[in-house]
Amino acid sequence: MEQLMKDFFLFLSKNKALTKAAKKYGLRFGASRFVAGELTEDAVRVIKELNKKGLLVTIDYLGEFVETEQEANEKTEHSIATLEAIGREKLQSQLSLKMTSMGLDISDEVILRNMRRILDTAKKYDIFVTIDMEDYSRYQKTLDIFKMLKAEYDNVGTVLQAYLYRVADDVEDLNSLSPNLRLVKGAYKESPEVAFPEKKDVDENYKKIIKMHLLNGNYTAIASHDEAIIEYTKQIAKEHNIPNSQFEFQMLYGIKNDLHLKLAKEGYTFRVYVPYGNDWYGYFMRRLAERPANVAFVLKGMFK
Ligand code: FDA
């Protein structure tokens, strides 16, 4: 039943008509638990509150799967405006983005031009940018573009997903670039030909790549709400004398907030992923798919 619900929400996350309708009608159905708001002002207010509590942020101007160059350019402008707001307001925030919203599916020329504009602005304000990893059909392309950009910029990183069979090879392959990587379990519906279907295998592979990347001496963001994974990371760091300055924990806005503060108080670097903007629908559906119990929030939101 849980798997069926998961598949259903991941199916809904790709529905273009619903994505369009969601943009028009604004944050609904309890989505504001996971999304900071629709406007830059909303995001700035939320980041200031988090920073005051000692939490760092990575902000994401939501968007994915644009189809025209004009839309990709508009999304790029929004991300640039977000960077300008971080700089102007002196926020302790990085930027996260999905390259499908900057033109990844359109052409190499469009995506590279837009990414260079974003990274140039980020560099001006000394802001680090993480390229989120999307579904497997964009995986190799994302890695190829990341490698090209990493050769030109030192303020860019990307994400690797532990559910992929090939991921340990990619950790090894990228090692020569000493990249700052965010490691996650993976949020998309993938075929058993490319990804572990069983959670226990994903968890084991996740531990394996966390250890590999840390022992390779690279900066590692462990982006997970799984307390067993957090304990595992602490233990590996202790056993191998890895300083706290070589890794950080990250969680999504609205999930396990108490744990954010607890880890920060224990002296770990902690970063909250804060999404905002009107293109919230796909992101929200993936959060429901991760935990169908969240549907209770949707039902509450419907009657508000
Ligand atoms: P797991 O799914 O095992 O959850 C552990 C526990 O956390 C659950 O038992 C529950 O208590 C809680 N929990 C998890 N998800 C929840 C939810 N939605 N609502 C309420 N509670 C929840 N993925 C991807 O494919 N590409 C990417 O670029 C990113 N980027 C990214 C950034 C950051 C900062 C985070 C934290 C996550 C991502 N992800 C991602 C998502 C990631 O792949 C994964 O889907 C989620 O983090 C859920 O997996 P966990 O590691 O939390 O473990």
Image: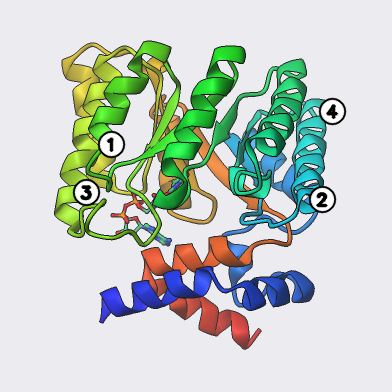
Write down the residue under mark 3.
202
Q: Give the structural element (helix, strand or loop) at label 2.
A: helix
Q: In which quarter of the image is the C terminus?
A: bottom right
Q: Give the structural element (helix, strand or loop) at label 3.
A: helix
Q: Where 89 sits versus 38, above or below?
A: above
Dot 3 amino acid type: Val
Inter-mark Cα distance, 3 to 1: 11 Å
Q: Position of residue 168 (x, y in %)?
A: 24, 31
Dot 4 amino acid type: Arg
| Residue 171 visible to an observer of this rendering | yes
Q: Give the structural element (helix, strand or loop) at label 1.
A: helix
The residue at the point 66 percent across, 53 percent down is 62
Q: Quadrant of the N terminus?
A: bottom left
Q: Which colour scheme is used?
A: rainbow
- Ligand 1 within 8 Å, label 2 CB: no
Q: Where is residue 22 in the image (x, y as percent from the top left)?
A: 69, 73
Q: Position of residue 142 (x, y in %)?
A: 49, 37
Inter-mark Cα distance, 1 to 4: 38 Å
Dot 2 amino acid type: Gln
| Residue 98 visible to an observer of this rendering | no
Write down the residue under mark 4.
88
Classify mark 1: residues with Cα within 10 Å, few (<14), some (14-19) or many (20+): some
Write down the residue under mark 1.
167
